[in-house]
Image (tube, rainbow, N blue to C red):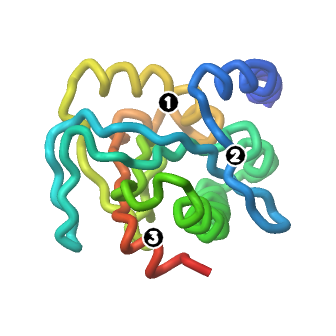
Amino acid sequence: MILRSFLLYMWSLLDPFYFALNRLAYVESGRIGNIFRVRLLRYRGHPITLSDGTCIRRGDVLVKIHLHNVKLLKLLFKMRSDIEKGKCISRVVQASLPGLASYVERHPKSAHIKGIIGVTLLHKGSRLLGFETFPIQSPWYNAFKWVSQTPLYFICVSQPIRTFRKQSIRLLLMPKSILMQRYSE
């Protein structure tokens, strides 16, 4: 518990630098505050065809979503059960998706945006929210993401050592059409 408190404290100190280095922007939202921070990017991976027929190719414009980890970890800090934590993450993400939809809708480059993308270890239940998951093709990018996502996993999960080897880093993708259809206000 003390180690987790220390890691959360250190993370909250480093978070403003991470925010600035990654050129992130906040997604405006209603009363809860949005769990996402975002930026536009041009996709650089292998072509991917989504279930609605949208094909994501190299150079397509996507909104990259980043979870606001410090905010999320403060919500999860006192919870003991991994099931309770998973439900909480799912609820917070679901509550933040309408704000993300309105951000995409109002963005000056909205016509060029094909969808949203994220990279995470915490992908269980993401299909229920409208995301599709894909493995990361690049071994270098996969290794980099393992290193960067591991601290979050160790803070979030009750028994991380026991379940760590079963986890995989996944790309989360949602086409703009599904985002607007399901979450547009």
Numbered disc total: 3
Q: Secondary structure at mark 1?
A: helix
Query: At 39% across and 48% down in the image, what residue appears?
Result: 62
Residue at mark 3 to residue at mark 2: CA–CA distance: 18 Å
The disc at residue 26 is 2
Mark 2 Cα-neighbour bin, 10 Å: few <14, some 14–19, many ≥20: some
Q: Mark 1 or mark 2, which is nearer to you?
A: 2
Left or right placement of residue 83 versus residue 176 in this view: right
Which x, y percent locates residue 130? 40, 70
Dot 1 corresponds to which residue? Answer: 149
Viewer-nearest of labels 1 and 3? Answer: 3
The numbered mark, 1 or 2, whose residue comes first in the sequence reads 2
Quarter of the image holding residue 54? bottom left
Q: Which one is in front, 82 or 73? A: 73
Q: Position of residue 82 (x, y in %)?
A: 60, 54
Mark pair 1, 3: CA separation: 25 Å
* Res 113 visible: yes
**Secondary element at tag 2:** strand
Residue identified by numbered label 3: 179
- The C terminus lies in which quarter of the figure? bottom right
In the depicted view, which residue is nearer to us: 67 or 48? 48
**Residue at 42%, 54% in the rendered image:** 116
Under mark 1, the amino acid is Gln
Asked where in the image residue 7 lies, by quadrant, the reply is top right
Q: Position of residue 114 (x, y in %)?
A: 34, 57
> From mark 1 to mark 2, how far is it between C-alphas?
21 Å
